């Protein structure tokens, strides 16, 4: 049977059909649709597959490791920067090993369509010394889930599945099979206790497995050699393989790489038969660097580092064709009439009223800074508000505001979203409380994870209690409703708390305009069908 699936949906369905026990994730584009698909899938619901959102990527990784310990197959999903949050648990999971199959999906975002950087998650797989797989199309994304779980259980190690935005958010027909039974290996009989003496033994065992991982890659059906004409060899990784085939068809010497570590024998064989090698990979020059090191400085290896492909941004059929010396297709020129339109906060969004109030109050101070965070409210950095001085990483608003206050700066204001606060803002607030920092924290609560489409927010209805429990004085935890009619009250409260010498928290709370509209439509539809 064939289904038309996004790359994310193919991964999700492949995991369900491979006997998945649970998915653990925090919403992050371009990975979000994986978990959403599993949450809505009938087979997953019937089997009781765990699919609730986690507070952050670290908790997701650790919970998945616990499910693996209990003998079930577990999937962890995150965008590439989420790997930074999960890194502690992820790297150590390679040393503890796994029991039930554990697959970590890292969705990279070359060109930064919705991200702060272009980091490449293949580095994390190499850093942790675990296998990685990289599908070139939706069919492989589906098929690889079964293979990845089997590889994980045979090696007793986590396996990384790396995808990029173009694959995650494009559709193709996928041939699917009947789901296998949910795997249950029973509770692990070993203890995963990484005391130094035990960890040294486990680390040595991980080193010994490297040869087995390499053998698995050399024999993988996802790594294949295609012989063609000419003296140029092409190593095409993941989605890059499609662009090479689109340009040259079957007339090229291609080594398709979709499983790591790199198949060294195949690469050395290509080097013997070709005078030079072009590495086509989306993301950073991970493979190019390794191939250069493998073949030596005297052998010509081309790619992103040599400028044959762009050093930044994602691969496209055009820049791959240019690197291959193919004839360029004529493209329609960009219109000089149509001006680019930057993104804006939705009309009616509560964040708009928050920024209006903030700008009004802070304009009365000779100098001020508002430290921002990751979410749709980050758009407050753009016109017409131009309110934010920073946006670095999840949770950084509070800690940066604290650092500025430690340097004597005032007023030092942090604005953070509800979901981001529970993701990684709470510890920063605790630091500020312990230091009695002179900061004002605005938790702009729209009752959802708005930027990624309206997923549940972990702390909904708990933020006042959390802040008080962390040590904020109850009288300095204030809740307001961000509406134009309440502007006098909001600005008064902001002024009072900014002038307070200590930690204060203001929570403007109003439901996201998009989720509110969605709920209204669903309610009308339910009424009509009643």
Image (cartoon, grey):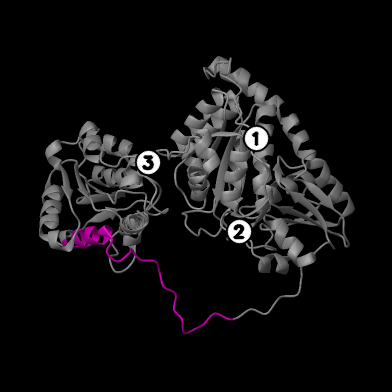
Compared with 293, 243 (above or below) is: below
**Mark 1: few, some, or many residues within 10 Å (few <14, many ≥20)?**
few
Residue 45: x and y, percent?
Answer: 50, 38
Q: Earlier in the sequence, mark 1 or mark 2?
A: 2
Residue at the front extreme, as displayed: 530
Magenta span covers which residues? Answer: 333-360
Is residue 122 among the parts visible in the rendering? no
Query: For mark 3, what is the residue?
Result: 423
- Cα gap from disc 3 to disc 2, whole angstroms: 31 Å
Q: Circle 1 sits in a helix, a strand or a loop, which is it? A: loop
**Mark 3: few, some, or many residues within 10 Å (few <14, many ≥20)?**
many
Question: Which circle marks residue 171 in the picture?
Answer: 2
Query: For mark 1, what is the residue?
Result: 180
Residue at the bottom extreme, as displayed: 337
Is residue 83 among the parts visible in the rendering? yes
- Cα gap from disc 1 to disc 2, whole angstroms: 24 Å
Compared with 8, 90 (above or below) is: above
Residue 195: x and y, percent?
Answer: 52, 17
Residue located 64% across and 55% down the image: 282
- Cα gap from disc 3 to disc 1, whole angstroms: 34 Å
Residue located 57% across and 42% down the image: 105
Q: Is residue 344 magenta?
A: yes
């Amino acid at each position: 049977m064939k289904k038309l699936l996004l790359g994310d949906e193919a991964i999700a369905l492949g995991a369900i059909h491979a006997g998945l026990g649970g998915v653990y994730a925090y919403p992050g584009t371009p990975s979000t649709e994986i978990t959403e698909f599993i949450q809505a899938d009938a087979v997953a619901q019937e089997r009781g597959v765990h699919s609730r959102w986690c507070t952050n990527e670290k908790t997701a990784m650790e919970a998945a490791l616990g499910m693996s310990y209990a003998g079930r197959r577990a999937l962890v999903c995150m965008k590439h920067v989420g790997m930074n949050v999960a890194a502690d648990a992820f790297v150590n999971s390679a040393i503890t090993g796994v029991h039930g199959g554990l697959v970590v999906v890292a969705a990279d975002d070359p060109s930064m369509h919705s991200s702060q950087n272009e980091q490449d998650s293949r580095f994390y797989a190499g850093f942790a010394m675990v296998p990685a797989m990289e599908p070139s199309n939706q069919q492989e994304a589906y098929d690889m889930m079964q293979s990845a779980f089997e590889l994980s259980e045979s090696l007793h190690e986590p396996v990384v599945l790396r995808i990029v935005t173009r694959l995650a958010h494009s559709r193709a027909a996928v041939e699917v099979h009947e789901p296998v039974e949910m795997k249950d290996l029973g509770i692990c009989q070993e203890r995963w206790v990484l005391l130094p003496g035990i960890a040294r033994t486990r680390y040595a065992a991980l080193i010994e497995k490297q040869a087995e991982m390499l053998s698995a890659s050399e024999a993988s059906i996802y790594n294949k050699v295609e012989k063609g004409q000419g003296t140029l060899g092409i190593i095409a990784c993941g989605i890059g393989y499609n662009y090479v085939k689109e340009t040259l068809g079957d007339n090229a010497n291609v080594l398709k790489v979709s499983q790591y570590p790199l198949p060294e024998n195949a690469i050395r064989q290509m080097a013997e038969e070709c005078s030079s090698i072009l590495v086509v990979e989306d993301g950073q020059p991970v493979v190019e660097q390794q191939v250069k090191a493998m073949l030596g400085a005297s052998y010509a290896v081309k790619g992103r580092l040599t400028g044959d492909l762009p050093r930044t941004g994602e691969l496209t059929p055009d820049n791959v064709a240019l690197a291959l010396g193919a004839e360029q297709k004529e493209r329609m020129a960009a219109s000089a009439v149509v001006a680019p339109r930057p993104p804006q906060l939705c009309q009616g969004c509560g964040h708009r009223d928050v920024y209006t109030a903030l700008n009004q109050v802070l304009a009365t101070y000779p100098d001020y800074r508002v430290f921002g965070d990751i979410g749709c409210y980050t758009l407050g950095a753009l016109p017409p508000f131009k309110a934010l001085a920073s946006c670095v990483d999840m949770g950084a608003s509070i800690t940066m505001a604290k650092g500025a206050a430690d340097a004597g700066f005032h007023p030092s204001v942090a604005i953070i979203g509800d979901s981001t606060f529970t993701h990684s803002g709470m510890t920063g607030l605790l630091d500020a409380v312990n230091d009695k920092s002179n900061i004002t924290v605005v938790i702009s609560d729209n009752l959802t994870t708005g930027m990624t489409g309206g997923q549940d927010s972990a702390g909904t209805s708990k933020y006042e209690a959390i802040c008080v429990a962390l040590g904020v004085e109850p009288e300095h935890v204030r809740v307001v409703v961000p509406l134009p009619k309440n502007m006098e009250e909001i600005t008064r409260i902001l002024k009072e708390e900014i002038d307070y010498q200590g930690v204060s928290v203001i929570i403007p709370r109003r439901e996201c305009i998009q989720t509110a509209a969605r709920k209204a439509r669903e309610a009308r539809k339910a009424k009509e069908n009643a």
